[in-house]
Image (spheres, helix red, strand yellow):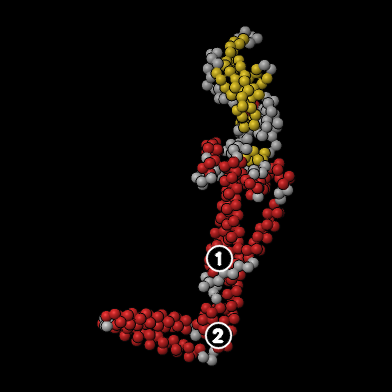
Amino acid sequence: MVITAADLSAAMEERANAFKSKGTVYFTNFQKERKHVFKDAILYEMAKDRIVPGYKDAKNKYHRSMKELTDLEKYMNQEQAFFHTVPDKVQQQWQETTLLNAKLKKEYDAKEGTLRGKEQEVHSTFEALKVENSKHQMSMKKNYGKYIYFTKQEKLYREKASLIRSNYKPDIIVYSEPLPNAVGKNLKYEGRIPLKRMPKVKYQDCTYFILTDISGIPKNGTLYRVHAVRDGAPVIQGKANVTEMVVGYKEDNASNGKSYWKLNAEEAKETTIKARFYKVRNVAKKAKFENDQNAALNGTYGIRKSKSYNERSNAVGKAMSRLVDANKDAPNGRLIRWEDLDENKLKRNDEYEKTVAELEIYERGLSLGRR
């Protein structure tokens, strides 16, 4: 099993999505807590309302009525100044508003009267509300700090994933479980089909494993061009050069005098085409990755979803997690491979320490109150 640049980019997008989900939770909690955070002046009014139920409602109604009456009288004065008269409808509205205002003032004064002599109770309730308010404010700050942290992390991982897609070919290997350094019968073509199960043909004392499907080749001496890999050819980065061959079935005679058709090679030429010996899980989307490198910068690239960690071997899962962390901190969009980790001294506990330190910064000094 190997990890390619495409796998790494997809895993970084998955990590970004995880941070986004966490950030959404903390932002929701922040909004909930913010509704319970008030300034001291509002808390004091809330304390009065707890001692005398209905006090806050009576005060608000009276003040709204006063504003409406003041605005109405201002309008009437303007009418009188310009037209020397006030419409009957406006005068009637003023009379009704005046009566309602007087009624609301009476109710408000009654609540105020009930409060007289209860200053100590109001103060004690106010202090209790301040303690409760402080708890909500502390929770609000913590949730907001975590929301900011996770939002920044989401943005960082997405940017790094985009840089990898834009600057590197998708099949670049960044991690590989041990693979032989030469082609052999136990290698699996595309990580699936063992070479020993493929047709073989000899040419100039070398054995070749034929990659092309030749099951339909007729046994009549016709020659065909096929792709093959030479047994013993060097394997670099999980790939080996493909050999183009001319093969066909040739009639031969056995020792008992009977003839049979034997696969025979007439020509072999090594090419620059590479045969992969690791899994390519979605060729179509991998090709899209390669073709859309520029489009990725504009956010139009469709992310290829990689296998989840529980479908990988434990070693590959750990390697992927560590590579994701390392590439998040890589400078200038550099692609960090597995062999670069020791060189750069990238350790996962450093990530934890950064997380704690950054959260502490956001949780200190935030002053967000409801107005």
Comes first in the chain, label 2 or label 1: 1
**Residue located farthest toward the top when viewing the structure as drawn:** 257
Q: Is residue 17 above or below residue 25?
A: above
Viewer-closest of 35 and 314: 35
Q: Please identify the quarter of the rendering in which residue 335 is found.
A: top right
Kindly state the secondary structure of the residue where label 2 is placed. Answer: helix
Amino acid type, callout 2: Val
How far across and how far down the image is residue 182, in percent? 70, 29
The three-letter code of the residue at mark 1 reads Phe
Q: Residues within 10 Å of mark 1 (few under 14, many from 20)?
A: many
Q: Secondary structure at mark 1?
A: helix
Q: Position of residue 69 (x, y in %)?
A: 37, 82
Seen from this angle, which residue lies furthest front?
82
Marks 2 and 1, how far apart at CA: 29 Å
Q: Quadrant of the N terminus?
A: top right
Q: Quadrant of residue 37?
A: bottom right
x, y (%) of residue 257? 62, 8
Residue in the foreground of this view, choosing between 19 and 231: 19
Q: Badge 2 local density, few (<14 within 10 Å), some, or many (20+)?
A: many
**Residue 282 seen in render:** no
Task: Residue at 60%, 67% (x, y): give it.
Answer: 366
Position in image of residue 228 (x %, y %): 61, 24
What residue is at 58 percent from the left and 53 percent from the top? 154
Q: Is residue 150 among what the camera can see? A: yes
Would residue 220 be found to the left or right of residue 235 on screen?
left
Above or below residue 171? Residue 227 is above
- Residue on which disc 2 sits: 122
The residue located at (65%, 34%) in the rendering is 238
| Residue bearing the label numbered 1 | 30
Rendered residue at 61%/70% (across/down): 138
When asked about the image quadrant of residue 204, the answer is top right
